[in-house]
């Protein structure tokens, strides 16, 4: 089974289970009349709707690239995560409204013990399903599954807190605690929705993934070949699980096109072996110039104009910036 099919199958399970859990939580609400349980149920409505949206986005993202979408359809996953984050925020605001309303106009609670058992069962299912979504989503680099996993586990934590609060109500007989609990978890839900929305917008806007870039730079720095004199203009753009890597690689000026291409093949093969096959590259080769000699690590160079002084370690500061060079020999070598 390929990764796209695996993502879709898992999201189908997310949708089916979300519908079942929503029904259980609404049953618990009607039994108890607890606004805290209603808070949990309302978040589950978001799970259901967001599950369908996520399923649609994964189906779209799995489509092959075409003339209208030369980089594929992977951005659909970020749009799905953005919608899900927005819905989580809206649910949080609505829960705040219901909590304040119940504080002002309280209604009696009943059968809290039965309600606790029902929502407790949903918490266990959500936690397990969320863990699976996060594991598969990170392994397959799926923004939609990662968003679903985070949302499901946030739902689990809020459910656990609500159960604890209901136990306190049973012990103290203070009904106002019900609304106070829902207010606290409404704020947690808002915070979770903000983070889902923030990460999805970062993907849509092609925001640099600093953690990924640092890892990639450290990996290449540790395995640098002697013909790799310099690496700069490194960019990584995400299209769902597909990563598009751009960079400039400086090699000795006397290499012919075939030899320069071999160095680029070595670079791209090395990255693929470490970061996965779902990658495409556009590598621009630059020829070294006289000022490269002092930092060039190539031994036995017969055309060296200046003695070697020291090796420059590649870092975010000197690899990522868009540096301009006026080289006399340049050739574009796209790798697909």
Image (cartoon, rainbow, N blue to C red):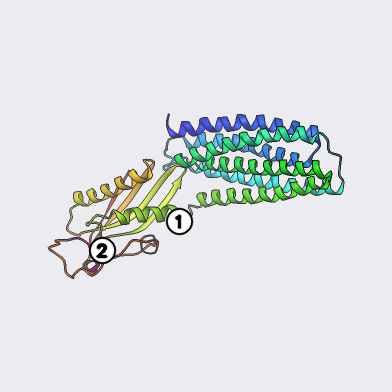
Is 114 in front, or is 333?
114
Instruction: Using the image, determine if residue 176 lies above or below residue 313.
Output: above
Instruction: Using the image, determine if residue 126 lies above or below residue 250.
Output: above
Instruction: Using the image, determine if residue 182 lies above or below residue 307.
Output: above
Location of the C terminus by quadrant is top left
Which residue is under mark 1? 210
Q: Is residue 322 visible?
A: yes
Residue 231 x/y as whole percent: 31, 58
Q: Residue at x 23, y 49 (%)?
A: 261
What secondary structure do most residues of the magenta stretch adopt?
Answer: loop
Q: Is residue 67 left or right of residue 260?
A: right
Quadrant of the rendered image containing residue 27: top right
Residue 149 x/y as whole percent: 56, 40
3D distance between C-alphas at marks 2 and 1: 29 Å
Residue 51 sits inside the magenta stretch? no
Location of the N terminus by quadrant is top left
| Of the image marks 2 and 1, the number of the one nearer the N terminus | 1
Q: Is residue 227 left or right of residue 16?
A: left
Which residue is under mark 2? 327
Is 165 in front, or is 59?
165
Residue 236 x/y as whole percent: 41, 51
Q: Residue at x 69, y 51 (%)?
A: 187
Magenta segment range?
A: 294-298
Residue 148 x/y as whole percent: 57, 40
Please tell me whether mark 2 or mark 1 is closer to you in this view: 1
Q: Secondary structure at mark 2?
A: loop
């Amino acid at each position: 089974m390929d990764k796209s099919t695996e993502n879709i199958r898992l999201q189908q399970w997310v949708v089916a289970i979300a519908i079942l859990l929503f029904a259980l939580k609404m049953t618990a609400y009607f039994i108890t009349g607890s606004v805290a349980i209603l808070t949990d149920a309302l978040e589950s409505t978001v799970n259901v709707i967001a599950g369908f949206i996520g399923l649609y986005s994964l189906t779209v993202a799995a489509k092959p690239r075409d003339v209208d979408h030369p980089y594929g359809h992977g951005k659909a996953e970020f749009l799905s995560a953005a919608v899900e984050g927005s819905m989580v925020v809206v649910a949080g605001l609505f829960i705040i409204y219901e909590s304040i309303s119940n504080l002002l106009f309280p209604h009696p609670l009943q059968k809290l013990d039965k309600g606790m058992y029902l929502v407790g069962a949903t918490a266990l299912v959500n936690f397990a399903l969320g863990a699976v979504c996060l594991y598969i989503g990170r392994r397959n680099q799926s923004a939609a599954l990662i968003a679903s996993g985070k949302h499901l586990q946030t739902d689990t934590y809020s459910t656990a807190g609500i159960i604890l609060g209901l136990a306190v109500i049973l012990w103290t007989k203070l009904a106002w605690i019900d609304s106070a609990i829902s207010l606290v978890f409404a704020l947690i839900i808002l915070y979770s929705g903000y983070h889902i929305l923030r990460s999805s917008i970062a993907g849509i806007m092609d925001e640099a993934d600093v953690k990924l870039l640092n890892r990639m730079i450290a990996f290449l720095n540790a395995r640098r070949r002697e013909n790799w004199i310099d690496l700069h203009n490194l960019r990584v753009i995400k299209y769902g699980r597909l990563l598009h890597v751009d960079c400039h690689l400086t090699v000795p000026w006397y290499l012919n096109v075939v030899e320069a291409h071999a160095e680029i093949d070595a670079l791209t093969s090395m990255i693929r072996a470490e970061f996965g096959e779902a990658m495409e590259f556009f590598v621009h080769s630059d020829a070294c110039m006289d000022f490269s000699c002092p930092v060039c690590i190539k031994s036995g160079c017969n055309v060296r104009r200046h003695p070697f002084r020291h090796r420059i370690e590649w870092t975010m500061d000197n690899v990522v910036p868009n540096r301009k060079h006026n080289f006399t020999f340049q050739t574009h070598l796209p790798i697909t």
